[in-house]
Image: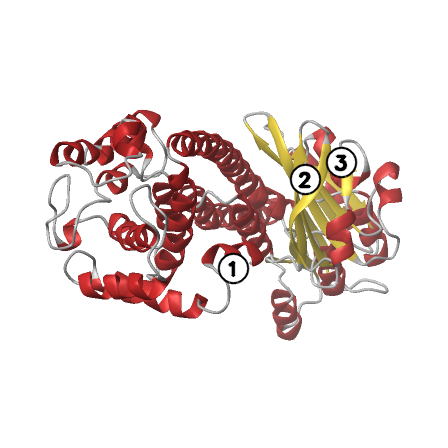
Amino acid sequence: MAVRTETILVVDDQPSVVQLCKRLLESQGFSAVGASSGEEALEKFRQQRFDLLLVDLVLPGIDGVETFRQAKEMQNDLVGIVITGHATKGSVVDAMKSGLYGFIEKPFTMRELMSTIDDVLQRNSVEKENVRLRAFVPLFEVTKAMTSTRQLEDLYRLVLDTALQEAGAERGSLMHLDERSSELRIVAARGLPTEILEKTRQKVGDGIAGLVAESREPLILNDGQMQDERIAQLMRPGSNLSAICYPLLSEGRMVGVLNLSRSSAIRTFSESDKELLSILSGQAASAIVSAQLNENLSRSYVSTIEVLAKAIMARDPYTRDHSDNVSLYTVRVAEELGLSGAEIETVRFASILHDIGKIGISEGILLKPGKLTDEEFEKMKEHPAIGANILADAEFPWDIVPIVYHHQEKYDGTGYPDGLTGEAIPIGARIISVCDTYQAVTSDRAYRKALPEEKAIDILRKVSGTQLDGNIVALFLKIHREVDGKGTVAQQAIAA
């Protein structure tokens, strides 16, 4: 005889029926427990978990249907079968409406009992599998988030919101583990007071989330049903809450803890919820680890960019403020054009480094106080290609090389290095070209003084549609008008 893993609670006010059912069930490998009333049955549910409730319809005190309803509040994935010798059409309908899966009329045979139980457990197994399959839909969204954003804050919020929605929870938080301090802190929350978000810090091993992080095991918390004294003392008595805390683990690494809660009047968390969150949490933890690696890598890249930018400044003091201001304007124009966050980030870094190739130009040409000779100008025209070669070796995650290489192209094809025209020029290069032109004519150079802003605006209008992209010029002038009288773009950026 095969040993079954299910535990069944048999509830009947006739001891002989309880004993008979227990004997039959145990003979088939089930674990069986008996109770003589609804009140006794509910007390047993507070003490342990059952896979199936076999309950008489007519009981002293709480009837069978109400017993099942209250038991299901404690254990949402519970399934039940009614056994009765007083069946009416109305009582059968009421039982089925309450969610009871099956109906057995006394007297019954062993075959009838086992057939009904096997059928109910099979149907419940199918429903659990549907829950598992349903979980893959939000997992797909979490996985997409990992590839579509490098912002950890956005990913934290998506993981929490997905978990809340799929688990039907009202409140929740996502806590990240700082491995250096072994401390959990809230990085995303819904429905929690601000003071909790700001003050909550838990060491591994302290508090409920800390215990989950320490044990690396999920924990279901239902008010008044906790047998573990240490955990029961941490819960607020009479809180009328049901909660679940799930550790976020990625290849054995503890990432954090996901906390979800509901009012127990709605329904308590169950093993089915735990199963769904096991799939979601595993994928979420992997996504978070990947995003953290991306963020750390991005910080490393930004540090490299800062070093390169300082190298440009050391060669040409003019380039320092020039590149900074071009960058600030290009971001504003890119935002006005409706470019994505990733595209704006790419344009920003390209604008900071667009003149990096000047490292390869001699100071005699770079800082010459007079007009360049034709030969010197040809050498100067090499700086976009030099810059592109330098950045290609750096292997940045942003596709900045084409922008740097083409930032001296002209809309009408008269620029360099390749003489591209119109929209064949990368959009980032076209943006930088407009902002670069404005900054160049309004800045002091080795060979001339800065021109007035009015003159610079006139120059932009004259070359709009020929040397420069007319749409981008129009956006730039719009931004310039908004800034005029309100401080420079740099001042506005600092204020923001």
Image mark for residue 306: none
Who comes first in sequence, dot 1 or dot 2? 2
Instruction: Tell me whether the residue at label 1 lies in contact with that at label 3, contact meaning CB atoms closer than 8 angstroms.
Output: no
What amino acid is found at the position of numbered circle 1 in the picture?
Answer: Gln
Quarter of the image with the C terminus is: bottom right
In the image: residue 242, left or right of residue 396: right
278 shown above or below 432: above
In the visual, does 180 lie left or right of 344?
right
Nearer-the-camera pick, 222 or 34: 222
- At label 2, which amino acid type do we have? Leu
Please name the residue shown 19% across and 38% down the image.
372
Q: Which residue is mark 1?
A: 492
Residue topped by disc 3: 210
At numbered mark 2, what does the secondary structure look like: helix, strand or loop?
A: helix
- Which quadrant of the rendered structure holds the N terminus? top right
- In depth, the one of 202 and 423 nearer the eye is 423
Q: Residues within 10 Å of mark 1 (few under 14, many from 20)?
A: few
Which quarter of the figure has residue 68? bottom right
Question: Which residue is under mark 2?
Answer: 25
Q: In this rendering, would 23 be left or right of 465? A: right
Residue 31: quadrant of the picture: top right
Q: CA distance from mark 1 to mark 2?
A: 77 Å
The chosen color scheme is secondary structure
Q: Is residue 4 visible?
A: no
Task: Mark 1 or mark 3: name the one nearer the start of the chain.
Answer: 3
Q: Badge 3: few (under 14), some or many (20 or more) residues near its Cα, within 10 Å?
A: many
